[in-house]
Amino acid sequence: MSMSGKRIILGITGGIAAYKAAMLLRLLKKENCDVTAVMTKAAENFITPLTMQALSGKPVLRDMFSAVADNGIVHISAAAQTDLVVIAPATANTIAKIRAGIADNLLTSIVLATEAPIVIAPAMNRVMWENSATQDNIKTLRGRGFLISGPASGFQACGDTGAGRMSEPEDILKDIRSILSGDASAPKNPGKLSGIKAVITAGPTIEPLDPVRYLSNRSSGKMGYAIARAAADMGAQVTLISGPVSLEPPPGVSLIPAETALEMRDAVMNSIPGADVFIGTAAVADYRAKEISPVKIKKSVHGGEISLLLTENPDILSLVGHSPERPRIVAGFAAETGNLEAYALKKLTAKNADVIFGNDVSDKTIGFNSDENEITVFTGKGKPVRLPRASKKDLGNAVVSFIADMLQ
Ligand code: C5P
């Protein structure tokens, strides 16, 4: 969708990520957007108004009480004449002010005065992001329909590592585009899962045989990551426990990497106390080597044949389903090559799950590794519900919406 001519207010607050705002401004200008930068006083400690003026080709708005501009009521005119407001970086302080409706500078006044959609890209230290005050503010803003873009996880300027880094400008641009185009993959029902804690597993597990070899499967993690993203977009606090995949964790999600089924089980069991929802999308290996060889298994020693003794892995979904800490909703997946309904209903009972999302992996165009999927939902009550073929991203939204309805 073309964003050409869209009027965008780019708010910049006082965080080290302010330098990335210059890159976001460049990307918006490349899309031919009409960008007005609005900077707080604190932002000027990190990037100069001159830089933003040069990049936007317009004076930067900084002063709430400019007598020359718009008869001194610049916040009202700017707020009315914009298609979208994006704040990047948004500090914990500015986020808290917006939640409270405080309008003590030009940017927060514009936010209060505008009817345009607002995108917030938080940027702060990991501990500040995880603080329940910030999390509560974010949940509330999501519930009010703000789009929270990020934050990403990784290395932070303060030396910490974790969630709180501002999203990359390209990712913020994607979120801006999705709002302006009203596209189908834009976050659905923001705030529908506010206050809900969700634990999601995704990807394969790998089960070592020796220091270099392992048993695994073809799971790409795409479905689980799409579900995690959809749940976070709807306001849930998401812990994603993931086997090794080559995907970026969705913004705002806490990622716990796990390699083996046993590691995944431990991470899940530590995470479910207090969780409202568990969704097991991981393709957990059913078996692992009974003993892992400490040295590389040599062909010269074993000759033409080799036997591997395997032992069964714990069934994580079943452990969660039968746990005294069982979340209110326990959901699993069934990837089958036939008899989908019979197997799904069996899993529902055996694993004490509330819902099984089934897909037929004999169809090569869906399921493992593909970008599309087709799901039938089994709850054991009434007729199965079909979620027709769609991108995994859209199905992630549909799966999470289904679970959100079950929570009502
Ligand atoms: O029994 P089956 O492997 O077909 O069940 C699939 C469902 O059970 C998926 O939701 C998967 O994440 C979960 N599962 C699990 N632990 C296992 C095997 C499967 O959590 N060891």
Image (cartoon, rainbow, N blue to C red):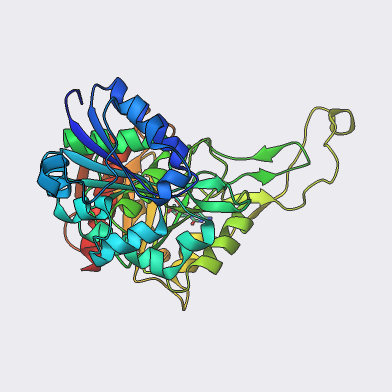
Quadrant of residue 82 in the image? top left
- Judging depth in this view, the residue of 202 and 214 nearest the camera is 202
* Residue 282 rendering spot, x and y as whole percentages: 48, 49
Q: Is residue 96 left or right of residue 390?
A: right
Name the residue located 41 percent from the left edge and 54 percent from the top edge: 91
Q: Where does the image place residue 213, in percent across and percent down from the top left?
A: 72, 37
Q: Residue at x 21, y 39 (%)?
A: 179
Q: Quadrant of residue 250?
A: top left
Q: Residue furthest right?
A: 301
Residue 234 visible (yes or no): yes
Q: Total number of numbered labels?
A: 0
Q: Position of residue 332 (x, y in %)?
A: 39, 56
Residue at the bottom extreme? 324
Which residue is drawn at the image coordinates 22% and 64% (left, top)?
101
Q: Is residue 102 left or right of residue 20?
A: left
Can the viewer see residue 339 in this picture? no
* Closer to the camera in the image, 399 or 122: 122
Q: Which residue is outermost to the front?
A: 67
Q: Position of residue 309 (x, y in %)?
A: 72, 48
Q: Is residue 306 left or right of residue 43?
A: right
Q: From the viewer's perspective, is residue 193 above or below residue 209?
A: below
Quarter of the figure with residue 234: bottom left
Relative to residue 313, is residue 69 depicted above or below? above
Quadrant housing the C terminus? bottom left
User: Residue at (25%, 51%) from the top-left corner?
Assistant: 106
